Amino acid sequence: KVVGLDGLVASFARSRPGIDFDAIDQQPTHLFFLLVVPEHSAGQHLKALARISRFLRSEEFRRSLMQAEDLKSILAAIEEEDGKF
């Protein structure tokens, strides 16, 4: 239980070589998102997951995240994709 959390907190991580999670497509996983929300967030996490899912449908977006060299580039890729919706 997270105490004192006012809203959604998101984190992103990337593994260039990928990590095996026994995916259906047998491919390693490269991009990871972690969402932490207050206990009674009324589905806030589901809305965030849906948005992330829409973003990740774009091959260009996934490629941008994989090729980003720094935090500024990652944030720019996310902001650019968010601007499309």
Image (tube, rainbow, N blue to C red):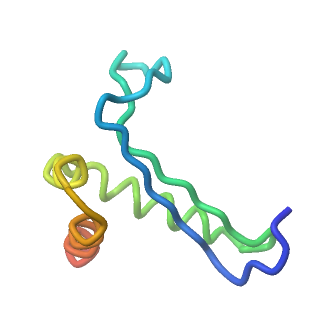
Depth order, front residue of 48/36: 36
Residue 49 drawn at (x, y percent): 50, 58
Residue drawn at x 71%, y 84% as measured from the top left: 6
Residue 12 drawn at (x, y percent): 44, 57
**Considering the image in quadrants, where does the C terminus appear?**
bottom left
Residue 15 as seen in the image, left or right of residue 80: right
**Considering the image in quadrants, where does the N terminus appear?**
bottom right
Residue drawn at x 71%, y 73% as measured from the top left: 42
Residue drawn at x 55%, y 55% as measured from the top left: 34
Residue 74 as seen in the image, left or right of residue 32: left
Q: Is residue 22 above or below residue 30?
A: above
Q: Residue furthest left?
A: 60
Residue 33 drawn at (x, y percent): 48, 53
Residue 67 drawn at (x, y percent): 17, 49
Q: Residue furthest front?
A: 70
Q: Is residue 65 above or below residue 43?
A: above
Q: Residue furthest bottom?
A: 6
